Structure formats: structure tokens, C-alpha cells
């Protein structure tokens, strides 16, 4: 997922399989690429080794993401980008690579200020708040906002992700389960579509974009679940569903 905040750079959210295709259309005059990783589950990093700009000599590439209590980001990524899982080692990439562990203080990327914060999901996981020209985009991928809340969604300031999403213009949020599926998968770190819009409403966002759909949900099932989610949303909340190749202007 690409965010355009600066003409001379590229900002990318996570590195699943789609990043391979994105790498083929990065303009040749781009000077810097920033990749914000929410966590290091394989579905969020498996495209990283196939991202062509990593093999471009002289290109400045910054990868941001969470470390763990026992291992830093570089060591964690090296476990994937090394044999036998991948033939090319992290240290052998041609670009000028910089790795940054996300803390709790805002940091700057070209054209935007980014804030990271931990969210409820298995393993070290963060969401991101991206601010540029007075507009706010919040990206919270794998997330279970109901978990740990005593009175969800009526205790917003105690909810996971609230600081990131509060009054964002657009919130891109996990929407994997229906209610029946969620009851069988509590603690797995994902949200129902209805919980996603309830979370968005509590955070007073203008628009929520539902993504990270369950691959077992066909289009008809997803349409039904989206109708349920929209019925549960506040009248002021714009509810959208992510599709491949969508372009959203904020």
C-alpha cells in the first residue's frame, strides 16, 4: 500500500506480496523509499525480498518496524532474508539500507510526520498515524480493539489504537471476521467488520476503509458483511471497502 506525500520519495505500508508489483512502477528518479512494517508475520513481509528497489545501487531505503524484547528489527528481518528461507541476505542488498525500530515518539519521513504505537495483536505489532499538510491517515492492520476493553466501544481512551486513530481523516483498519467467526477466534488479533466501524466511530474518524478481509469470504459474503457494518456505523461515518488498485485522495 503506497502513500504519496512527497514527489521525490515513496512511502509504503507493509510488505506483503503486493509490494513486488509496486516495486515495478517506482519512478526511476525517486531518491528515497520508506517502508513502515506493522509487524513481522510472514504475510506482511513475504514480498520484501522481491521488491526491486532494494537491488538499486545508491537508492536510500528506510525500513521501520517493531523490535521485540529479545531481538532487534535487523536480527528479526535477517531470519527471513537469509538462507534457507531466502537466497539473498539482508546485508547483501544493493541499496543504501537503513533500519529503524519504532518507538513512541513521532518521526519524520519526506512530506509527513509519523507516529507509531503498539496495538492488540499477537507479537510486537504497531499501527501508524501519518500526518501531512493538516490531514491524517491512520493505518492499523492486524488489530483486535475489543480485546482488553472493559466496555467496548464506550471506553475509547482505554482502547488499543485510540491514540493513533483519534479524529483521523481516514482510518484503514482490519476487518477480517463476522461475529460468529470472532467468537471462535478471540485473541487471534483481528477484528470483525462491525467492531471496526464501532472503533472508528468511537475515535471520531471521518472515513474508515475496511481491509484485511478473510480470504474465505467471497464477494457476496463480503457485501453482506459490509451492509451489516454500515448499519452499525454512526450516520456521520463514511464506510468504504478496500479493493485492489483503489486510489484515495485525502
Image (cartoon, rainbow, N blue to C red):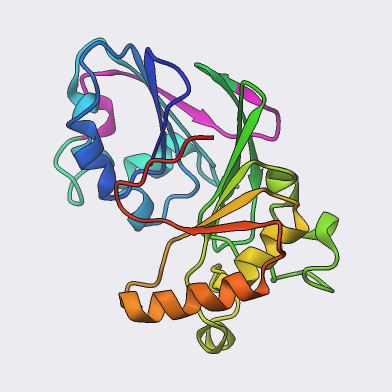
Residue for point 35% across, 47% down:
246
Say if the magenta span includes residue 185. no
Query: Considering the image in quadrants, where does the N terminus appear?
Result: top left
Residue for point 48% across, 23% down:
5
- Say whether residue 114 is visible: yes
Q: Nearer the viewer, residue 51 or 81?
A: 51
User: Residue 130 lies in what quarter of the image?
Assistant: top right
Q: Position of residue 157 (x, y in %)?
A: 84, 54
The number of callouts visible is 0
Q: Of all residues shown, which one is farthest toward the front?
A: 235
Q: Is residue 199 above or below residue 66?
A: below
User: Residue 32 lies in what quarter of the image?
Assistant: top left
Is 27 left or right of 111, judged from the image as shown? left
Q: Is residue 58 above or below residue 113?
A: above
Query: Considering the image in quadrants, where does the C terminus appear?
Result: top right
Q: Nearer the viewer, residue 38 or 237?
A: 237
Q: Position of residue 187 (x, y in %)?
A: 60, 75
Is 121 left or right of 80, judged from the image as shown? right
- Say whether residue 47 is visible: no
Residue for point 50% across, 85% down:
181
Q: Of all residues shown, which one is farthest toward the left?
A: 87
Q: Is residue 236 above or below residue 164?
A: below
User: Residue 238 lies in what quarter of the image?
Assistant: bottom right
Residue for point 58% across, 54% down:
208
Provide the residue span drawn in magenta: 89-107
Q: Position of residue 225 (x, y in %)?
A: 49, 78
Q: Is residue 34 above or below residue 199?
A: above
Q: Position of residue 106 (x, y in %)?
A: 67, 27
Q: Nearer the viewer, residue 216 or 235?
A: 235
Amino acid at each position: 500500500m503506497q502513500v504519496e506525500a512527497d514527489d521525490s520519495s515513496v512511502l509504503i505500508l507493509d510488505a506483503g506480496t503486493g509490494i513486488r508489483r509496486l516495486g515495478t512502477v517506482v519512478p526511476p528518479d525517486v531518491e528515497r523509499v520508506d517502508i513502515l512494517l506493522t509487524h513481522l508475520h510472514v504475510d506482511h513481509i513475504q514480498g520484501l525480498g522481491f521488491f526491486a528497489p532494494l537491488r538499486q545501487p545508491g537508492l536510500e531505503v528506510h525500513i521501520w518496524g517493531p523490535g521485540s524484547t529479545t531481538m532487534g528489527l535487523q536480527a528479526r528481518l535477517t531470519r527471513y532474508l537469509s538462507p534457507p528461507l531466502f537466497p539473498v541476505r539482508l546485508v547483501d542488498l544493493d541499496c543504501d539500507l537503513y533500519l529503524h525500530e519504532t518507538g513512541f515518539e513521532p518521526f519524520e519521513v519526506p512530506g509527513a510526520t509519523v507516529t507509531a504505537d503498539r496495538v492488540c495483536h499477537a507479537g510486537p505489532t504497531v499501527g501508524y498515524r501519518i500526518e501531512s499538510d493538516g490531514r491524517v491517515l491512520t493505518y492499523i492492520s492486524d488489530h483486535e480493539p475489543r480485546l482488553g476493553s472493559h466496555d467496548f466501544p464506550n471506553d475509547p481512551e482505554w482502547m488499543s489504537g485510540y491514540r493513533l486513530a483519534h479524529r483521523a481523516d481516514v482510518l484503514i483498519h482490519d476487518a477480517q471476521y463476522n461475529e460468529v467467526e470472532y467468537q471462535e477466534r478471540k485473541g487471534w488479533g483481528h477484528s470483525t467488520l462491525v467492531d471496526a466501524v464501532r472503533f472508528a466511530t468511537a475515535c471520531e474518524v471521518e472515513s474508515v476503509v475496511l481491509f484485511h478481509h478473510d480470504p474465505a469470504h467471497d464477494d457476496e459474503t463480503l457485501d453482506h458483511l459490509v451492509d451489516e457494518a454500515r448499519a452499525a456505523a454512526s450516520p456521520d461515518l463514511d464506510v468504504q471497502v478496500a479493493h485492489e488498485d483503489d486510489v484515495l485522495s485525502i
